Amino acid sequence: MTTKFQDPFRRRPDGFSLLEVILAVGLLGFGVAIVLRLLTGSMDTLKVARAAKHSLDLVPILNAKLSHPGIDDPPEVARTDVIPFQRRFFDAICREILDNGAVQLLVYQFQQNDEIQGGLENALGTNFVHLQQSGGGDLERFFSGTLDQIAVDKPLEVYRLVLSASSANSLDKLESRNPSADEANRGEVQVPEFFRYDILTGQLGNSAGNESLFVCRLRKSLDPGDLVFLAIQVHIFRQRGTAGKSEGNPSPAYWNQGFQVEDLVFSYNTSLLAY
């Protein structure tokens, strides 16, 4: 009987087997998925970092606006009645916070016309748009930007500001409650009470939806005309979507569609003076 042995050095047929092809494609797809995931994480980190930088740039601009509400008016409408104008601005802010719980604004920076800036390159302007969610108020006089103008200016980013009463105010200005046991042990007699504020409807209430935050509330008996100082808390949110592509849809509902409370960049306290 003759026994045949297979030559281990015999050349294999050209090409790859089906199993090898499937494994290679699977490994390639897995590698591509990992790379894309890493790139997506990096892009998200860059977006967060850019939003934080841009919003930080807005802080001194907003503080200047709150201190001098006519700072961005053109020279031809400059006023001499600075103190009464500031007083009216203070009263309007306080009145809306008193009635609705907060003031909401859209703010963005945009490339200005060179002729306005005397030929300066890369000159940036800032627009504030009052989001009047629930009627009343006269803040449009002080925040003269419009929703229509956003599509014209085509800013890269739009931010939503929510201005509410700060817990740093004295308790005679704020709604307060009795302290909890832990708060009483720390020596608290009364503490500020926080209320849920619905950002999409611009109203206080227990029925507020998911896009809401907790704010302090001014006492209902408070008269803004009796105040000369108010500490306010500013919450800065990044609006999702491309602002310059709103396609002439100037309504708060359009901006509410792209809003999520998780897009809060940061919050800080500042002050508002009546003079």
Image (cartoon, rainbow, N blue to C red):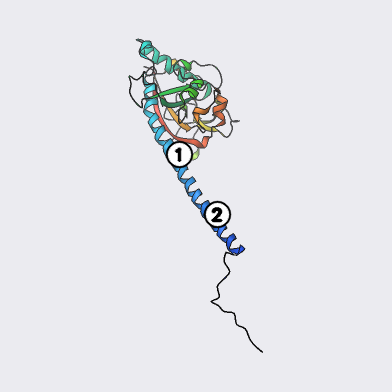
**Residue pointed to by mark 1:** 47
Does residue 216 appear in the picture of this structure? no
Q: Is residue 106 above or below residue 3?
A: above
Instruction: Identify the mark nearer the N-term, 2 or 1.
Output: 2
Residue 139 horizontal/vertical position (percent):
47, 17
State the mark number for residue 29.
2
State the mark number for residue 59.
none
Q: Which amino acid does label 2 sit on?
A: Gly
Q: Nearer the viewer, residue 17 or 151?
A: 17
For the C terminus, the quadrant is top left
Q: Which of 135 and 154 is in front in this view?
A: 154
Q: Is 233 situated left or right of 24 in this image? A: left
Q: In this view, does 192 lie above or below 93?
A: below
Q: Is mark 1 on a helix, strand or loop?
A: helix
Residue shown at the point (46%, 38%) measured from the top left: 183
Residue 150 horizontal/vertical position (percent):
48, 24
Residue 201 position by quadrant = top right
Q: Is mark 2 on a helix, strand or loop?
A: helix
Few, some or many C-alpha atoms within 10 Å of disc 2 (few <14, some 14-19, many ≥20)?
few
Q: What residue type is labelled 1?
A: Lys
Q: Nearer the viewer, residue 84 or 144?
A: 144
Q: Is residue 102 above or below residue 31?
A: above
Residue 56 position by quadrant = top left
